[in-house]
Amino acid sequence: MSLSVTLATKDESANLSTCLDSITFADEIILVDDCSSDNTVEIARDFGARVIVRDSGGSFHENKNLAIDEASGDWILSLDADEVVSKELARSICDILSFPKSNGYLVDRHNYFLGKWIKGCGWYPDHILRLFRKGESRWPIEIHDTPKLEGGNQNAPLLKGPLIHFSYRDLEQYFEKFNRYTNRLAVEYGLHHQNMRGLSIPINLFARPGYWFVKKYFLMAGFRDGLRGFFISFSSALTIFVSYLKLWEAQRYDKPSR
């Protein structure tokens, strides 16, 4: 069974080489780049990846799906540029593809923040579908959603070995992505016909972020991860606050949220 690794990137020169070094077992690499301003494209081509440059217009998952559509392999391993396939996971993938017994497999993703594996805040366990037969799954357009098999992922087997996810290596990287991320969330809120009028203003700007902080930090044990856990919980709440504030701005001035 041939394997295509698919990626969508934007300004990922700091992460991409490490990611591509971990997938030398792939038959091909298809990378769709969102008009990067750094040398992401050059790095990908040096590794032999087929590169397509496309402006996603803020809908990053469309580029992920384009990479899947352009892949020629029987199987798809869909990755992000800040993810690294461990040696144990690589062996598991190669073994499974010799005699696949399912249309898709979950991976055990370990999410790191500022150099530490985060086990609270709802970040672990994080079992997600990333390996599947071509045609069996795609990325939903919503920014929080992940690929699913028809009928759901509950019966999909879990591969051995972690997928290492370096979500943010430093705070500068976090704040660079924060504006793009909240822009996209504001658009999604608008597409789901949410409004920022009357009682919805205090609910969306204060009640929702406050609940999310309590959930992440206390109910999901973010406090166990120390200052990192507090920051993740606080910044998650701040993301909701800023996204709804951008939706309020767009609706107030009767202009589309960007």
Image (cartoon, rainbow, N blue to C red):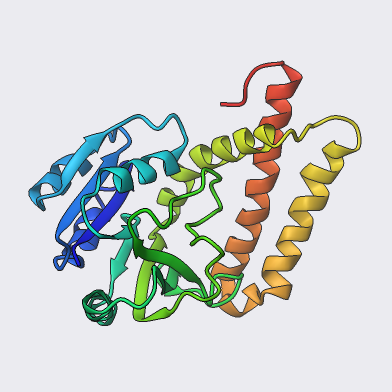
Above/below status of 128 relative to 138: below
Could you tell whether 167 is left or right of 1 in the image?
A: right
Could you tell whether 29 is left or right of 178 in the image?
A: left
Quadrant in the picture for residue 214: bottom right
Above/below status of 113 relative to 87: above
Look at 37% across and 53% down and name the residue there.
Answer: 135
Q: Is residue 113 visible?
A: no
Look at 70% across and 37% down and name the residue there.
Answer: 192
Q: Looking at the rendering, in which quadrant would you find the C terminus?
A: top right
Look at 70% across and 25% down and name the residue there.
Answer: 249
Above/below status of 76 relative to 139: below
Viewer-proximal residue among 140 and 39: 140
Q: Furthest-right residue in view?
A: 199
Viewer-proximal residue among 255 and 53: 53
Residue 153, x across and y down, in percent: 52, 69
Look at 55% across and 73% down and name the residue there.
Answer: 154
Residue 173, x across and y down, in percent: 40, 50
Q: Looking at the rendering, in which quadrant would you find the N terminus?
A: bottom left
Above/below status of 213 relative to 44: below
Q: Is residue 51 visible?
A: yes
Viewer-proximal residue among 207 and 26: 26
Could you tell whether 24 is left or right of 169 in the image?
A: left
Residue 195, x across and y down, in percent: 78, 32
Residue 60, x across and y down, in percent: 43, 41
Q: Furthest-top residue in view?
A: 254
Viewer-proximal residue among 170 and 107: 107
Number of numbered labels in the structure image: 0
